[in-house]
Every structure is written in C-alpha cells, then in structure tokens.
C-alpha cells in the first residue's frame, strides 16, 4: 500500500499560517484536540517541511512529540549542514523529494506542512488531501496559507468537517 501526500496545516481565520514575525504561538492550545488531527498523526509515516518552519519551532518534534518517524527538511542550503542532527535535510526537485518522502513513510502518509513546501507540492500535482485546522484569531498580516499567483485554480472536494477542522480531497 502506498500512502497519500497530505498537506496538514493550522491557519488563522483570515488565512495566515504564521504571524508577521513568522511566529506560531497563536496557533497552539487554542483548538480542542480533534479526531481528525488524531487520525492524521496515526496515519503519518514521514513528515516534510521547509527550513523556515524549523527556524520557527526549533528542534521540536512534529505534533508535540507524540508522533515519531522520519522528519525531512526541504532546503536550498547544503543538506550536509544539519542544524538539527535527528532531521534529514533534503534538496532537489520537489517530485524527487516527495517520492523519497513516500518511501520514508513506508506505506503510510507523507505529511507536508509549512509555506513553500506544500505550495510546491500542490503546484506539481502531488497533494492528495488537505487537512486544515482553523484557529479563531485574526492576525491581519503574516505568511499566507496559499499564495501562488498565475496558477490555475485547484478544485477540492469536502471529505470531512468537524467544527473548525476540515479535510479536502484534491481533484486532479
């Protein structure tokens, strides 16, 4: 069985994933734990994000440490310069990075998160699902959830809604 590529993200009600200073503290502990989040964690085999997210959260493991598995950091810097030794730094074409991430997930899902990595993955037609948690806060400015001028619209099918938690299938 091959896993899916799941874009898992928390955003503000006005569509930001990071505040004006790239901080994420506004997103922690606001929403109640959800069945959808628990399912994502349970079905995740590997986790892929960009270096900006590591800069924002440091060497903290995804999902507060309740999940263990390979963490891949997509970077344009030399992958040999691992600031966090237990993470694997990768670079290259996003298609190859996603293929290797799915191998690392070993039949489970590959979660992509952050700003640039999910956008590149979606624009390459590689995202299967988007799981989105909306925090009831208005940031006013910051890092947008999705910003990709010039691309064709991406159609989504609603799979699950659970209060402020949503799952969409990417229609290809």
Image (cartoon, rainbow, N blue to C red):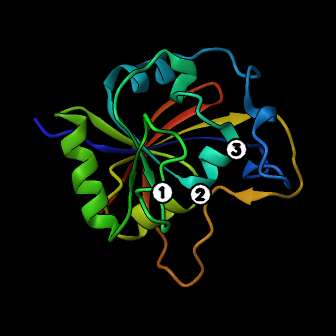
Question: In this orientation, which residue lies closer to the viewer: 157 or 102?
Answer: 102
> Which x, y percent locates residue 102?
23, 45
Up the image or down, 116 lies above or below 44; here it is below
Quadrant placement of the C terminus: bottom left
Task: State the residue lying farthest toward the front.
Answer: 81
Instruction: Give the distance between the C-alpha atoms of the residues marked 1 and 2, in whole angstroms.
Output: 6 Å
Task: Rate crowding at label 2 as few (under 14), some (14 to 19) or many (20 or more) other CA atoms within 10 Å.
Answer: many
Quadrant assignment, res 44:
top left
Q: Is residue 14 above or below residue 146?
A: above
Q: Which residue is mark 1?
A: 118
Callouts 1 and 2 close, C-beta under 8 Å: yes
User: Of the residues under marks 3 and 2, which one precedes in the sequence?
Assistant: 3
Residue 16 shows which numbered tag?
none
Of residues 101 and 79, the one drawn nearer to the viewer in this rendering: 79
Check disc 3: other Cα within 10 Å, few if <14, some if 14-19, many if 20+: some
Tell which circle, 1 or 3, labels the residue nearer the N-terminal end: 3
Residue at left offset 47%, top offset 78% = 152
Disc assigned to residue 56:
3
The answer to whether residue 71 is above or below residue 118 is above
Q: Which residue is mark 2?
A: 115
Q: Residue at x 40, y 62 (%)?
A: 121
Instruction: Mark 1: give few (<14), some (14-19) or many (20+) Cα within 10 Å.
Output: many
Residue displayed at 59% across by 29% down = 60
Residue 134 falls in which quadrant of the image?
A: top right
Q: CA distance from mark 1 to mark 3?
A: 17 Å
Task: Pick the quarter of the image with the N terminus.
Answer: top left
Mark 1 element type: helix
Q: Position of residue 169 (x, y in %)?
A: 37, 47
Horizontal side, residue 164 vs residue 135: left or right: left
């Amino acid at each position: 069985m091959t896993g899916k590529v799941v874009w898992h993200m928390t955003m503000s009600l006005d569509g930001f994933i990071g505040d004006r200073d790239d901080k994420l503290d506004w997103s922690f502990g606001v929403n109640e734990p959800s069945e959808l989040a628990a399912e994502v964690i349970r079905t995740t085999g590997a986790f892929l994000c960009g270096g900006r997210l590591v800069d924002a959260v440091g060497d903290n493991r995804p999902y507060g440490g309740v999940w263990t598995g390979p963490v891949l950091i997509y970077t344009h810097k030399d992958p040999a310069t691992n600031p966090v030794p237990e993470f694997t730094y990768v670079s290259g074409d996003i298609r190859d990075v996603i293929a290797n991430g799915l191998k690392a997930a070993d039949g489970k899902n590959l979660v992509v998160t952050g700003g640039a990595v999910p956008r590149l993955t979606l624009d390459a037609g590689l995202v299967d699902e988007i799981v989105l948690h909306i925090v009831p806060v208005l940031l006013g400015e910051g890092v947008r959830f999705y910003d990709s001028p010039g691309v064709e619209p991406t159609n989504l099918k609603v799979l699950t809604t659970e209060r402020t938690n949503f799952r969409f299938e990417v229609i290809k």
